[in-house]
Amino acid sequence: MNPDPKKSKVLPSNLPNSNGSSHPHSLFPDEVLEKVLSLIDSHKDRNSVSLVCKDWYNAERWTRSNLFIGNCYSVSPEIVARRFAKIKSVRLKGKPRFSDFNMLPRDWGANVHSWLVMFAKAYPFLEELRLKRMTVSDESMELLAKSFPQFRALSLSSCDGFTDDGLKAITTHCGNLTELDIQDSVTVDVGGGWLSCFPENFSSLEILNFSSLNSEVSFEALEKLVSRCRSLRVLKVNENITLDQLQRLLVHAPLLTELSTGSFLQELTPRQYEDIESAFGNSKNLQVLSGLWDATSFYLPVLYGACSGLTFLNLSDAVLQSGELAKLLAHCPNLRRLWVIDTVEDKGLEAVGSSCPLLEELRVFPVDPYDLDHRHGVTEMGFLAVSRGCRKLRYVLYFCRRMTNAAVVTIVQNCPDFTHFRLCIMNPRQPDFLTNEPMDEAFGAVAKNCTKLRRLSVSGLLTDTTFEYIGKYAKNLETLSVAFAGSSDRGMQCVLEGCPKLRKLEIRDCPFGNAALLSGLKKYEMMRSLWMSACNLTMKGCRLLAREMPRLNVEVIKDDGSDEIQADKVYVYRSVAGPRQDAPSVVLTL
Amino acid sequence: MEFESDLNLKATELRLGLPGRDESEEQSSSCVKKNKRSSSEMDSSSEHQESGPSAPKAQVVGWPPVRSYRKNVLQQQKKPESDGSGMFVKVSMDGAPYLRKIDLKCYKNYFDLLKALENMFKCTIGVYSEREGYNGSEYAPTYEDKDGDWMLVGDVPWDMFITSCKRLRIMKGSEAKGLGCL
């Protein structure tokens, strides 16, 4: 690393420098450098800046205010506190993604408490905290509520560990709160008392999302809150809020840009029906709409008046048929993102193709993921139909029970701009529906055609050929998810050798063994993490990896009844903090 | 057994063991821990225990990769329409010796349904009114809803009716009078 790149330029070395800069050749006094750097937001850019030279490293660390840590165990709170001085907002991620699918023991870790203790000491002016897949206890929430007088925004995505008491602490004490956003919460039984704890004169809320909490909140308190908070622009309520209650909330908040409704099924009188219809008609600023539990064709039309400006429609909680979807989409010409359940079937997706020319993202979820005899849902035909009508598609998540190579090849010819391609053929190792061949050509086409591809999930019957294609063509790939695929170690090796930008690799139920694992020795330090479960790894191989690469944490999760030789679930990640101290007994750190 | 009805999976499936071995044995040899995990985690991770048979291959932990909170929502939402096999309900008529069965999905609205019932039982049901029910008609159609209550056909929107109707009973007008007057 060149300690001072400016030395190689032609510069007058006797430039007057009265502002106390430490380096005689430096053009910029520290204060100027800091001023310039304070305008840089992206943490990737800042990381690059910090590598230039010692001056820049210091200037950067004094001016960084947004902290992003993609793996909470890659660094320790102490190291962070030593380096950065003025952090105002923090984004922290914990558990590996497969924890979403119940593959980790409950007490695996990623507890935020030690971070909060450090933040309370080092960053008392903290304003925002955004956590993903972390455990947050009530005690932590209390600490949070009482330690940061300027705290404004709390966002919890896929977090667990808290109850009503923790939330009560937040709503009682955080007088400047503008955002309380709880998504995909894993805590099922959270009482509803927290909502009533906002003080009587509290009015700063702009974002409120409790759609995934099962709690029954006091509607009276909610209505009062909504009418007090004149700047409220995002309101996402849970299923317990009824349609006519929703109508009253909408009347108080005509400026909403994002709404998640409660239950959309209720016996309404004609008058109530009109009222809710007109409330939606008046919500001219709505861009994002979700919720809609139990929506039926009778009540969906009340929405139509609010649909013209919609850019994101999330119907993943509404079990709709094709006709209902088609009618609804006819009112949503500006849709960029659409999430649906596969009960809309291919016919519904045809409607997507014809009604949503601006669509960039489509996610199709299975109504019943475990019903193997369920021959309905969507097939390759639906996906094809969407690709014909929605040429701007960049993000797809598609659960299906039937797919063909030919269809995927055509789809990526229609839509070459995919950045995220997540295809889940739900029956493991299922071949091409028409030809019975492996699905290698499908994913080969994706890798070849979609040069901007950053995230890929593969499925179906796949040989090593798929991974040869990925290694050869997917040069921008950052995240790869593999399940029930591949023929030998070679598959994994191709990916490790061929994808320069790979950051996250998650593998389950594949015939990859120690040779494959060890072929990526050098690579893992350049990645955030590697997950391998139900593959052919042994403890010996994992120990070897741990020994060779001291800056990697190699963790093995032992399942009940497994022997001493096999390594069932292996999680490898780079860390400057050394092995973690809070692992439960089922997690061995090698 | 699972595979015979499936897409010839057996013939093309990649195996990790020796060829010529039995299917279920194959499963247990290559994924011994997986099955164990399946059985121990199934109770906690999958909230539903389907009444149908589960073949050994059916339930794999964490697959398909659908989040558990979403699973909960979807389980509650299983509407009869979504299995595509029709919504057959029994229809009895007072005085008739045997019952009939009709598929509610064949009808788009109450008018179609009542006309069909009139044809099937050779009776007159007449016209529904919110205030009077089927007063004045020889027969009045009633149904048992999800809660077990007997309701007058026509009070709730059609969509709500077909999801909550469990069986129909065509009552003699004189007996139904009480319902209509409520």
Image (cartoon, coloured by chain):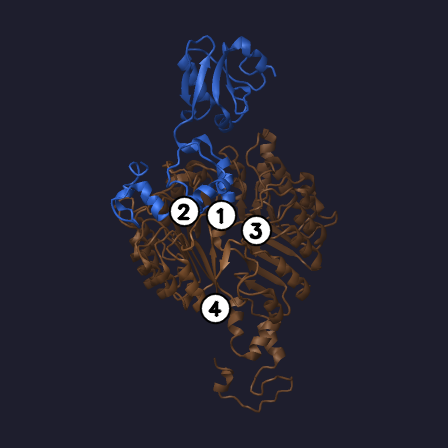
Chain colours: A brown, B blue
Q: CA distance from mark 1 to mark 3?
A: 13 Å
Q: Are marks 2 and 1 in contact (CB under 8 Å)?
A: no
Residue in front for this viewpoint, A483 or B16: B16
Rendered image quadrant of residue B21:
top left
Q: CA distance from mark 4 to mark 3?
A: 30 Å
Name the residue beneath numbered marker 4: A550
Going by the picture, which residue comes out furthest to the front? A564
Going by the picture, which residue comes out furthest to the bottom? A14
**Label 2 crowd bin: few (<14), some (14–19), many (20+), radius 10 Å:** many
Q: CA distance from mark 1 to mark 4?
A: 29 Å
Name the residue beneath numbered marker 1: A102
Q: CA distance from mark 2 to mark 1?
A: 13 Å
Question: Which chain does the residue under circle 2 lie in?
Answer: B
For marks 4 and 3, the one nearer the N-term is: 3
Q: Is residue B31 above or below residue A298?
A: below
Name the residue beneath numbered marker 2: B34
Eye-nearest disc, 2 or 3 = 2
Residue in front for this viewpoint, A333 or A46: A46
Q: CA distance from mark 2 to mark 3?
A: 26 Å
Give the secondary structure at mark 4: loop
**Label 4 crowd bin: few (<14), some (14–19), many (20+), radius 10 Å:** some
Rendered image quadrant of residue A380:
top left
Q: Is residue A307 left or right of residue A88?
A: left
- Residue type, numbered disc 4: Pro
**Label 3 crowd bin: few (<14), some (14–19), many (20+), radius 10 Å:** many
- Residue type, numbered disc 2: Lys
Q: Residue A43 placed where, x, y %? A: 53, 67
